[in-house]
Structure formats: C-alpha cells, structure tokens
C-alpha cells in the first residue's frame, strides 16, 4: 500500500536498487554523500510488523548495503538506524562515517563538530558509482536467492 503523503512511499534520493519487497536509495543528505536507506516497500511502521522471513530479508539487505560501503569506502564506522519517529514507514539508515565528517563522532542528526570538509566529500563522491554498483549486485543476488 502506497501512502501518497509519506515521503518514503514516493521516490526520493537516487534509487540504487528496486526489488519487490524493498529498495535501496542513496539519500541526498548534504555533507554525507555515503548516506543510504533501505526502505521496505509495504507501508509498515515497525520491524515487528514483518513476518520472520521478511525480517530476515530486510536485515540481509541492510547487511548487504553495509558490506558494500565497507568494501569500497573503508569508513571509520558504519551507523545503522531505524528511528521512524518523523516518518513512520519502516526504513533503515546505513551511513558510512569518517573521522573527518562534520559531525563525527556524534550522530549525523546532532550538532556539527566542525565545518564540512568539501575536499573530502568530493573525493568520496567520486567513489559512489562503484558503491552503487556493488550494492546493486549484492541486492540482486539476495533477491535471486529468495
């Protein structure tokens, strides 16, 4: 079920992978170019709204995105979050974090610790095509295994 007022039910960000059960997008979050979301297709609010098989599928997708970010970018840390307080539609944030990013080590939603390092962001952006392709391949393989 699509809810037209839900920003996650409609297209947002760069769609990296679209499957029947979920999609992965690269979000447009200024200063955080390696900010991805795994968005469940059905408009459900909580992870526990999914059946066991779908919970496993969802976490396997989150894991695949995390592994792709680690393999290509070698970040300092990966942040995973499934808050849903603002948008009550099941989605996971998968964010590659670096010591140089403006908010590190605080969450991306906290107060900035330093200015955005434009040069570092530009270097990272140059690798996003490879990240996207790695995610596409991993998620396609995951969906074929179902």
Image: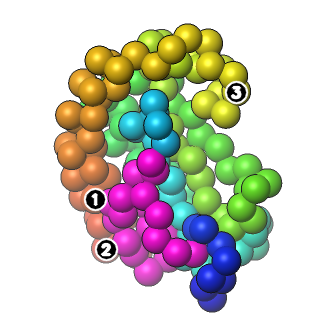
Q: CA separation, marks 1 and 2?
A: 12 Å
Residue at the (29%, 66%) spot, across then down = 140
Residue 45, position as x, y percentages in the image = 75, 69
The C terminus appears in which quarter of the rendering? bottom left
Residue 9, position as x, y percentages in the image = 57, 75
Q: Which residue is mark 3?
A: 110
* Badge count: 3
**Residue 133 in view, yes or no:** yes
Taking 73 as reference, is 85 above or below it? Answer: below
Dot 3 or dot 2, earlier in sequence: 3
**Residue 55 in view, yes or no:** no
* Disc nearest the viewer among 3 and 2: 3
The N terminus appears in which quarter of the rendering? bottom right
Q: Residues within 10 Å of mark 3 (few under 14, many from 20)?
A: few
* Disc nearest the viewer among 3 and 1: 3
Q: CA separation, marks 3 and 2?
A: 38 Å
Q: Which mark is residue 21?
A: none
Closest to the observer, 1 or 7: 7
Splitting the image into 4 quarters, where does residue 44 fall? bottom right
Taking 129 as reference, is 46 above or below it? Answer: below
Taking 70 as reference, is 59 above or below it? Answer: below
Residue extent of the magenta highlight: 9-28
Dot 3 or dot 1, earlier in sequence: 3
Residue 115, position as x, y percentages in the image = 51, 14
Q: Circle 2 sits in a helix, a strand or a loop, which is it? A: helix
Residue at the (58%, 68%) spot, across then down = 8
Closest to the observer, 33 or 137: 33
Q: Which residue is mark 1?
A: 136
Residue at the (40%, 24%) spot, across then down = 75
């Amino acid at each position: 079920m699509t809810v037209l007022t839900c920003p996650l039910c409609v297209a947002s960000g760069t769609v990296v992978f679209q499957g029947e059960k979920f999609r992965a997008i690269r979000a447009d979050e200024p200063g955080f170019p390696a900010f991805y979301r795994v968005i469940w297709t059905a408009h459900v609010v909580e992870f526990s709204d999914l059946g066991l098989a779908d919970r496993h599928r969802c976490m396997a997708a989150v894991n695949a995105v995390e592994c792709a970010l680690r393999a290509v970018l070698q970040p300092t840390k990966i942040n995973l979050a499934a808050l849903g307080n603002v948008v009550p539609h099941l989605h996971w944030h998968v964010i590659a974090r670096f010591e140089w990013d403006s908010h590190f080590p605080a969450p991306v939603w906290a107060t900035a610790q330093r200015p955005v390092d434009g040069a570092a962001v530009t270097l990272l952006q140059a690798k996003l095509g490879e990240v996207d392709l790695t995610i596409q391949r991993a998620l396609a393989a995951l969906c074929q295994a179902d």
